[in-house]
Image: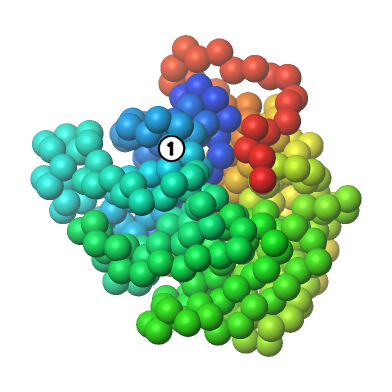
Amino acid sequence: SLLPTQCVARLEKHMDGVWYVAMSHDGRTIASSSKDKTVILWDATDPGFRIVKQLIGHNEACSHIAWSPDDQYILTASYDNNVRLWAPPGSVHVRDSDEKGQRPLRTFAKHRQSVTAVGWLHDSLHFVSAGFDKHVLLWKVDGTRVNRWRFSSRVQDLGITRDGMRMVVVNSNGHLKVFDLATYDELFSLPESDGITSIAMSQLSDQVLVNISNATPVIRLMDLAERRVVQKYMGHFQGRFVVRSCFGGPREQFVVSGSEDSQIYIWHRHFGSLLEVIPGHASTVNAVCWPCLTPANSGCSAPVTTWLITAADDHTLRVWGPSSSSACSELTVCDASVSKSSRGSDHAQ
């Protein structure tokens, strides 16, 4: 099987639940954020997935991460109401921070409540941030606030379309709103009857995954051009916590999701059929990342094989490869005690 069902590494450094994971666009670095207030950068090109850097500075849980399109910046969002801008190793901006890049380049502190999501525009110079304070802010990396959108309820998540021209925003009222990033105008709104907890944007089409939490959890595939649901995925478990999904595999032909039953679910994107349920974690799987890389954005001349990375409340990340991969490596890089008992996520909606 070409599906990544074999655990090839378990990454243990976080001291609390891991809430989010994102890979750099060149496929070389994994970033993970945690309730322990830190973000860790892991070397995806190293067989041991060594730690490249630990970003320390937030005063509350780190909720979200976003790599700039050119991988020269990384944004971290936190429940301390702040967004921090960092220069990852190898960035031309490291010298603007300090000689080791240990401090953030800038802290953005205009949100009045927890920051839930961040996202980059294509120029790698502007980004947006969303929060429970019912606002989405558009920033320049120099600290200038360019625009502010106000909503009737707290903002759960946001995403940028593949063309970089539109922003999709989800608030706790269950509305999915689409905005023009050139004019700042709302283009249209798609109301949902159930609560949306998170979204995931396609990088190859005008489609978005919408995670719905209710008595029977469902992930809906929404086509923004057609303004309708074109597929749905069911079988996973999600109650009152944020559980994220993503597109994955070659040509984004799969949909992957975490689950509150400690497992990972993989569906066929177009047919909606459940293909695999993967055990391994000891508690809620909060986030998943299965990037689709090509030689063009990886800097390689040969096809790129990427990992499925999962983040969970058992304090660990797991790296998954095809079933022909070697058995799961016990990559313990600290002496942190990790509870193996199943428990609910603290990352509530």
Q: Position of residue 66 (x, y in %)?
A: 41, 54
User: Which residue is drawn at the image coordinates 68% and 33% (left, top)?
Assistant: 345
Viewer-proximal residue among 172 and 90: 172
User: Which residue is drawn at the image coordinates 11% and 36% (left, top)?
Assistant: 99
Dot 1 crowding, Cα within 10 Å, few <14, some 14–19, many 20+: some
The residue at the far bottom in this view is 226
Q: Quarter of the image containing the C terminus? A: top right
Q: Is residue 122 above or below residue 145?
A: below
Q: Is residue 135 above or below residue 187?
A: above
User: Which residue is drawn at the image coordinates 40% and 62% (left, top)?
Assistant: 137
Check disc 1 and report its element: helix, strand or loop: loop
In the displayed structure image, the side of residue 125 where residue 114 appears, left or right = right
Residue 127 appears in the figure = yes
Q: How many numbered tags mark residues here?
A: 1
Quadrant assignment, res 274:
bottom right
Q: Position of residue 127 (x, y in %)?
A: 36, 63
Viewer-proximal residue among 324 and 190: 190
User: Which residue is drawn at the image coordinates 65% and 32% (left, top)?
Assistant: 346
Visual colour scheme: rainbow
* Mark 1 residue type: Asp
Residue 306 appears in the figure = no
Q: Position of residue 108 (x, y in %)?
A: 31, 49
In the displayed structure image, the side of residue 23 where residue 5 appears, left or right = right
Viewer-proximal residue among 324 and 175: 175
Q: Is residue 305 above or below residue 259?
A: below
In the displayed structure image, the side of residue 142 where residue 47 appears, left or right = right
Q: Position of residue 29 (x, y in %)?
A: 38, 46
- Where is mark 1, residue-wise? 80
